[in-house]
Amino acid sequence: MKVLLVTLFLPHHMATHAGGRYVFEVLQHIAQHHEVHLVTRLETDEIPLLDSLKPFCASIRPYIYRSKAKRGLIDNIRLVANYIGFSRYANNIIQTEDYDLVQVEWVETGLFIRKSSTPMLLTAHDVMTKPADRKAQNAANPFSRLFAWTLHLLTGSIECRIMKRFDLVVTLSEFDKQYLRRMLPDVPVASIPIPAGLDITTKQYARNNNTIVFLASFKHRKVNVDAALYFYSQVFPIIRRELPDARFIIAGYGPPEELTSLAEGDPQVSVTGFIEDIDRCYKEAAVFVAPILIGGGIIVKILDALAAGTPVVTTSIGNEGIRAVPGHDLLIANSPEEFAAATIKLLRDPEGAATMAKHGQEFVLREFGLETSMKKLEIVHQDLISHGGERSYS
């Protein structure tokens, strides 16, 4: 089978984008059985990584965007224009060349992709309408509420129009699948769990007492920056009153000055930047926190922390796509006071924390294993091809 894989972010095991890391596994798996042609958007500093993808691809069509450490208004406009350009570029390839299957990653990629006679699958890594919905519901005043609801309606309209052009939409969680079914009851939707713990090994490391870690990609990811600031300003002070030696480590690619400045003025805070050994980072933490306030898709960092056997505290939003059992696999907290109490509980009871972490690890390896995900992807591909894009998914 000749497959065209179109991805908004470079698929690579060294990808700084969590979704790019997952799509790399998808690329490798498809390449074992089929002929893969890759169309990928990438930044200039990622160009050296392309050579390592050649063994998996019959052809690679890169669409390059200039890397920027910081982005202002003009840069953001250029980024949107780049997304549009990439979508048009991919559409031209889809409409003029012959493939047995087209698989498109990320909803934004499909903005200008038209329906084709070739069976087409869209992977919705994030449901764009979901965070827009939450922002509208949580708007603080009438003016911001009006703006937020207008944006929500516009986002929903665009997302629905994109998805209707595809024969099948795949979500990475059952929660998102049901959310999309309410939005688009006539569009076939399937769920394939994103694999957890792709970078987790069997190595063991000693836990660092009273060490709290939040690991995420921060470059151009304001939601992750806001989550770190929320924990530092509203949760961490409560924890320090109970545990004066507690440390908060903000780890991950591209932290902006508003995060790096925290470490400059507070010796109990570390901002590491890019982490080479993610496995060790998770396993040395006494507690992993994910104070997710707005979510559009499944939170991969929570899955990875669970896979590493690290106790996790997150919000209801952070757990909605994972569906771990609160109090058994992880702890859920939705206010600063609850978050602090849950974190303190785990820090003060290492044995109880280890028991919960074991349950969480067993759960995530059972429900989000790589083999399980790739088997489901194979079934989806086979059904889509054999039914000519007309398969009805339950």
Image: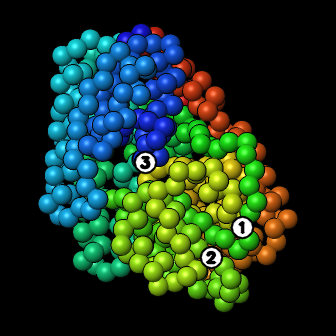
Q: x, y percentage for residue 87?
A: 22, 35
Mark yes or no: residue 63 visible. yes
- Helix, strand or loop under label 3: loop
Vertical position of residue 81 compared to residue 235: above or below: above
Q: x, y percentage for residue 374?
A: 57, 27
Mark yes or no: residue 166 visible. no
Q: x, y percentage for residue 367?
A: 67, 39
In terms of sequence position, does the residue under pointer 3 or pointer 2 come before the other? 3
Question: What residue sits right under mark 1 in the picture?
Answer: 208
Vertical position of residue 120 compared to residue 172: above or below: above
Q: Name the amino acid, label 1.
A: Asn
Closer-to-camera residue (49/379): 49
Residue 1 lies in what quarter of the image?
A: top left
- How packed is label 2: few (under 14 Cα within 10 Å), some, or many (20 or more)? many
Vertical position of residue 71 compared to residue 177: above or below: below
In terms of sequence position, does the residue under pointer 3 or pointer 1 come before the other? 3
Question: What residue sits right under mark 2 in the picture?
Answer: 247
**What is the spatial separation of the Cα atoms under label 3 and label 1, in whole angstroms?**
26 Å
Closer-to-camera residue (141/125): 125
Q: Which mark is residue 16?
A: 3
- How packed is label 1: few (under 14 Cα within 10 Å), some, or many (20 or more)? few
- In the rendered structure, are the residues bearing label 1 and label 2 in contact, judged by CB atoms less than 8 Å apart? yes
Vertical position of residue 239 compared to residue 67: above or below: below
